[in-house]
Image: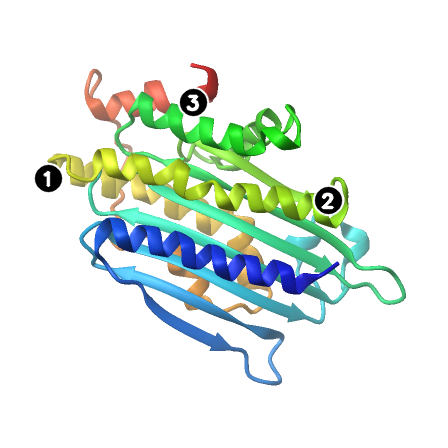
Amino acid sequence: MNTQDVRTYLLALQDRILGAMEAESGDRFVSDSWTRPPGERLQGDGLSRLVEGGSLLERGGCNFSHVKGGAMPPSATAHRPELAGAPFEAMGVSLVFHPRNPYVPTVHMNVRMFAALPAGREPVVWFGGGMDLTPYYGFEEDARHFHRVNRDALAPFGDDKYPRFKQWCDEYFFLKHRNEPRGIGGVFFDDYAEGGFEQSFALMRAVGDAFTAAYMPIVQRRKALAYGERERDFQTYRRGRYVEFNLVFDRGTLFGLQSGGRTESILMSMPPVVTWRYNWSPEPGTPEAKLYSDFLRPRDWAVE
């Protein structure tokens, strides 16, 4: 196990993704490096990179973090109770881009490594991550493209990986209290250690490396589409679903808060402007209604 190789890859991935986004938008991400002071529950360092009020992204952030702690928090041991209380090491890159134009979808991507270090035993290492797309106005072409790039990235690791991780994503990014998906999904995997460290690390890299190919062509197709107050209003309403999921269900958010992580970095995923309405639904036959009827349901996008 060479965690330095993982760290080197993650920092380079952060650079590549933000370089592509800056070239596309002309907006510059500010950098905020941090180190945890001695005596805190978590030790480690990270690099948060953020843009707010940009021409393309109303808010977007991409974080790298590498932390160590004395005892794993409950969110990390829910499926591995035998590791409760063990020291741990975790590192990853996580991004959320909230575009200004309602026709450009919000996107989330995360890749990470986690190592539990139980006393007197070998480290228990696993990987996780994925990406998912949250459109406000759906385009079949975009949904098919996003899923096909993910399918092709996972193909070298077995024909079972994309369907398995796609279903996992559909089930994970689901708002149970509303009986509604957050978006059109993508792929998601966690607690992954199949084939040992090198094979699992290679799969994580394949997902991370696929992000720009999956998302940037969609940005290029939609960023110049004209929109008005109606589209903007629907966008801010649907962003509320994003907030609800992240604060109630998201394991990464819960892990960060429970382990004493850096709050500003953890909550960087929140959209800048959000609205809620009481018991609202779109008028039948409208583009807003089409999002619910045609996109916010599981579909086999990669073969349609």
132 in relation to 304, above or below: below
- Along the horizontal axis of the image, is 50 left or right of 38? left
Residue 36 visible here:
yes
Which element is circle 3 on? loop
Residue 296 visible here:
no
Which element is circle 2 on? loop
- Along the horizontal axis of the image, is 121 left or right of 207? right
- Mark 3 or 1, nearer chain start: 1
**Mark number, residue 297:** 3
Q: Nearer the viewer, residue 56 or 172?
A: 56
> Quarter holding the N terminus?
bottom right
- Mark 2 or 1, nearer chain start: 2
Q: List x then y, in percent, for residue 138.
A: 29, 27
**From mark 2 to mark 1, how far is it between C-alphas?**
47 Å
The amino acid at mark 2 is Ala
**From mark 3 to mark 2, how far is it between C-alphas?**
30 Å
Q: How many marks?
A: 3
176 in relation to 16, above or below: above
Residue that label 2 marks = 193
Q: Could you tell me which residue is drawn at 46 percent across and 36 percent down?
A: 177
